[in-house]
């Protein structure tokens, strides 16, 4: 019986991490309005990414290349999603 209680305790602790940190992140942005608070909470910080400056530069270059590639597409997001899922990205251009 004690094993079951320990299992449920560990499970509950793990599951409650998500809402706890979500609420903490949203409430830490008190100086913003409600919609801006949610938008800021769900967007990455400026420090997010590789720690190495070499890797960071390469990563930013990759992100910029992919952004430009996405801008060239002229089909719907649903079609883009389906093509990416089924590895047909070369047909999107």
Image (cartoon, helix red, strand yellow):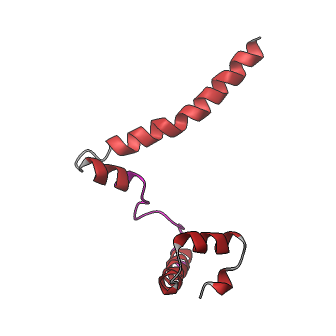
Rendering quarter of residue 54: bottom right
Determine the residue positioned at 46% across, 40% down: 21
- Any part of residue 52 in sight: no
Is residue 25 depicted above or below 87 in this figure? Answer: above
Left-right relation of 16 to 31: right
Residue 29 visible, this angle: yes
Left or right: residue 31 compared with residue 6:
left
User: Magenta residues: mostly which secondary structure?
Assistant: loop
Which residue is drawn at the image coordinates 36% and 44% (left, top)?
26
Q: Residue furthest top?
A: 1
Where residue 9 sits in the image (x, y, percent)?
A: 64, 22
| Residue depicted at 32% across the width and 44% down the height | 28
* Number of marks: 0
Residue 20 drawn above or below residue 47: above
Residue 21 placement, left or right of 58: left
Q: State which quadrant residue 91 falls in.
A: bottom right
Q: Is residue 44 magenta?
A: yes
Coordinates of residue 90 in the picture (x, y in percent): 67, 86
Name the quarter where the N terminus is drawn: top right
Instruction: From the viewer's side, name the closer residue of 60 and 35.
Output: 35
x and y percent of residue 40 in the render?
Answer: 35, 55
- Is 51 in the magenta? yes
Q: What residue range appears in magenta? A: 40-54
Name the quarter where the C terminus is drawn: bottom right
Residue placed most toward the observer, 18 or 50: 18
């Amino acid at each position: 019986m004690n094993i079951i209680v320990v299992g449920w305790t560990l499970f509950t602790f793990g599951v409650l991490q998500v809402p706890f940190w979500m609420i903490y992140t949203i409430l830490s942005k008190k100086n913003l309005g409600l919609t801006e608070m949610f938008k800021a909470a769900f967007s990455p910080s400026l420090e997010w990414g590789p720690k190495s400056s070499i890797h960071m530069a390469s990563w930013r270059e990759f992100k910029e290349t992919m952004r430009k590639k996405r801008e060239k597409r002229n089909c719907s997001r649903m079609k883009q999603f389906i093509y990416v899922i089924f590895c047909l990205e070369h047909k999107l251009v």
